[in-house]
Amino acid sequence: MTLPRSGTGMFLGKFMPPHLGHLYLGEFAQQYVADLAVVVGTLASEPIPGELRYAWMRELFPNARVIHLTDENPQYPHEHPDFWAIWQASLQRVLPWRPDYVGRVQAGQSVLVVGASGGVGSYAVQLAKAFGAEVTGVCSAAKADLVASLGADHVIDYTRDDFAAGSRRYDLVLDIAGNPSLKRLRRALRPRGTAVFVGGENAGVLIGMGRQLRGVLLSVFVRQRLALLTAKERASDYESLTDLIEAGQLVPSIDRTYPLEDAPLAVRQLEAGHVRGKVAITVDR
């Protein structure tokens, strides 16, 4: 069966020098992506000039958008604390289309939020519902009522049930808890579904990003999409959030407030997993 080509995609590398592996990966991507951008990176010290590598890639991919990124960005996450933000800003300057939202939720889709009762998850549940999705939240039994009150259609108690073990499959999985294996995440997804990793974790080396980076690399070889979420600030997003807040579709879930002197206690409660949603610190003037 031949699947329709649609959407936009990016293939980023140093290509020093280009080889058959690059050709095979690019051709694979072009089977599914209608508008592929091949981005040739720049190094601080270049044994092979970027202009030459750019010319080679244009020869290899005559039907793709080949772009020479001249910014000298860090090559690895540990080299700069703002690694992801730097790369995001660079790519947005050169790509011919604005990168889409990572999850791409559409009305009628099924969404699983792992870690639905936390500070991020409580907003994710509400946003997915506002976009018209059928939402399932994963949390402990003690917080199931909170997740249901936020609009979740289904709630799974992770202490009793495995979200990947049943027959239900999801178009989008938001992995906020940072615990499921890649195998479990993929089992919960539909054949062309997307899993989005939110935040870092204690998952080995690479500043707590080992599992996420393995997932992104795996996406090259499978139909499912495993992607990283990096924070973005756009005025249009704030305007959309304002509309949702004013319509009552997005409300903060505040477990309790603490005076400033009790901030260490609030942090300990968060670390222990006792907080439902968020906590707030009050400052007396």
Image: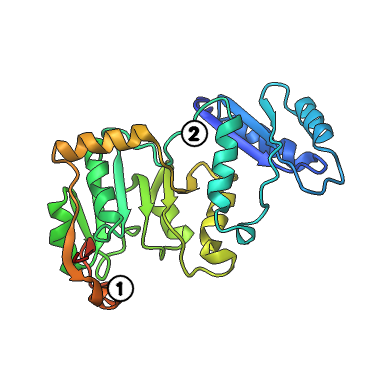
* Left or right of 267 in this view: 99: right
Instruction: Give the residue type that dot 1 points to.
Output: Val
Residue 248, visible in the rendered structure? yes
Q: Residue at x 26, y 43 (%)?
A: 127
Q: Position of residue 64 (x, y in %)?
A: 66, 25
Q: CA distance from mark 1 to mark 2?
A: 35 Å
Q: How many marks?
A: 2
- Residue 134 appears in the rendering: no
Q: Which mark is residue 99?
A: 2
Q: Nearer the viewer, residue 161 or 2?
A: 161
Task: Return the x and y of residue 265 as percentages of the image width and height.
Answer: 26, 78
Residue 189: horizontal and vertical position, in percent?
A: 39, 48
User: How many neighbours does mark 2 have within 10 angstroms: few (below 14), some (14-19), or many (20 or more)?
Assistant: few
Find residue 66 and report its image quarter: top right
Instruction: Find the residue positioned furthest to the front.
Output: 285
- Pointer 1 local density, CA inside 10 Å: few below 14, some 14–19, many at least 20: few
- Residue tagged 1: 267
Q: Does dot 2 land on a helix, a strand or a loop?
A: loop
The residue at 73%/40% (across/down) is: 22
Q: Nearer the viewer, residue 61 or 232?
A: 232
> Residue 259 falls in which quadrant of the image?
bottom left
Residue 225 appears left or right of 116: right
